[in-house]
Image (cartoon, rainbow, N blue to C red):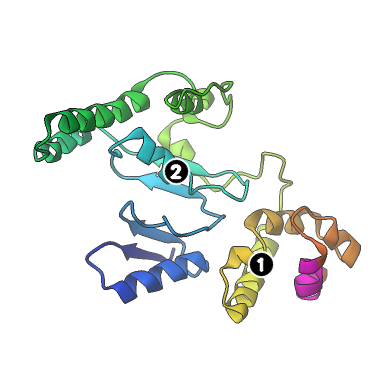
Amino acid sequence: MRAVPYHAGLEDAVRARHQDAFARDEVDVVVATIAFGMGIDKSNVRYVIHREMPRSIEGYYQEIGRAGRDGLPSDCILLYSWADVLAHRRVQEGIEDGELRREAGRKSTAVYELAEAPGCRHQRLVAHFDETIPACGTACDSCRGTSFTDLIQPARADHGTPTHDGELFERLRALRRALADAEGVPAYIVFSDAVLARLAAVRPIDDAGFLAVPGVGPAKLARYGEAFLRVLRGS
């Protein structure tokens, strides 16, 4: 697994290089501070893992929003304990304004209470923002009755996406990366992982079949169709 760091202790050029590598799918994992990803529109993030508790529900909501923008299943995993709340409080002691200090304390405690509360995690999260949704039933560990180890299995092929050939999918990803590098754009600009998964599942062999895949339009057929169909026909 290819992994790189991203934090304030690195030189600007190194941080920029690591960010670009992640955006182009040249690395699999970035171990980073929370500022990473704010300026990245990367659609195929499969996991967002917090190794400690965020300081607020609002911050957590924004950070997990970086996962699964392509519509494929993605997991958000939070590792936390009451020690995180205590660590936050030690930092908050340096806030001179009493009301701001108390508000910061309330926010960090609210994250812990959110993580500990029973019921659907999606329901509880949006309830903080005064929204109401049905229980997800299958998309959180609480509804599914799963443990942490169940959450770190290979990506599932559900949610309406047909089972695809993993080897073919990787060949399509390699082609996408080569095309993206040649054009100097992030890989998702060529096609998202969701489109590649669908291509690997249905294996179109002509223009009509390729165009029938959701996410493929006439412009992308004209630009990339021949190259991708060559791989698909050879599979």
- Mark 1, residues whose alpha carbon is within 10 Å: few (<14), some, or many (≥20)? some
Q: Which residue is drawn at 77% across and 60% down?
A: 216
User: Closest to the observer: 153 or 176?
Assistant: 176
In magenta, the rendered stretch is 219-230
Question: Where residue 196 sits in the image (x, y, percent)?
Answer: 69, 59
- Give whichever of discs 2 and 1 has the lower sequence position: 2
Question: Where residue 114 sits in the image (x, y, percent)?
Answer: 36, 25
Image side of residue 162 versus residue 55, left or right: right
Question: Where residue 229 sits in the image (x, y, percent)?
Answer: 81, 70
The amino acid beneath tag 1 is Val
Image side of residue 173 versus residue 164, left or right: left
Residue position for label 1: 190
For the C terminus, give its image quadrant: bottom right
Give the main secondary structure, helix, strand or loop, of the magenta stretch: helix
Vertical relation: 200 (above or below) 185 = above
**Is residue 230 shown to the viewer in this render?**
no
User: Closest to the observer: 228 or 181?
Assistant: 181
Q: Residue furthest bottom?
A: 182
- Look at the numbered disc 2 and give the secondary structure of its residue: helix
- Mark 2, residues whose alpha carbon is within 10 Å: few (<14), some, or many (≥20)? some
Residue position for label 2: 64
- State yes or no: residue 225 in magenta: yes
Q: Residue at x 47, y 59 (%)?
A: 40
For the N terminus, give its image quadrant: bottom left
- State yes or no: residue 156 in magenta: no
Question: Where residue 39 sits in the image (x, y, percent)?
Answer: 44, 59
Using the image, tell me which numbered label, if any, was put on residue 68.
none
**Is residue 85 shown to the viewer in this render?**
yes
Q: Residue at x 81, y 60 (%)?
A: 203
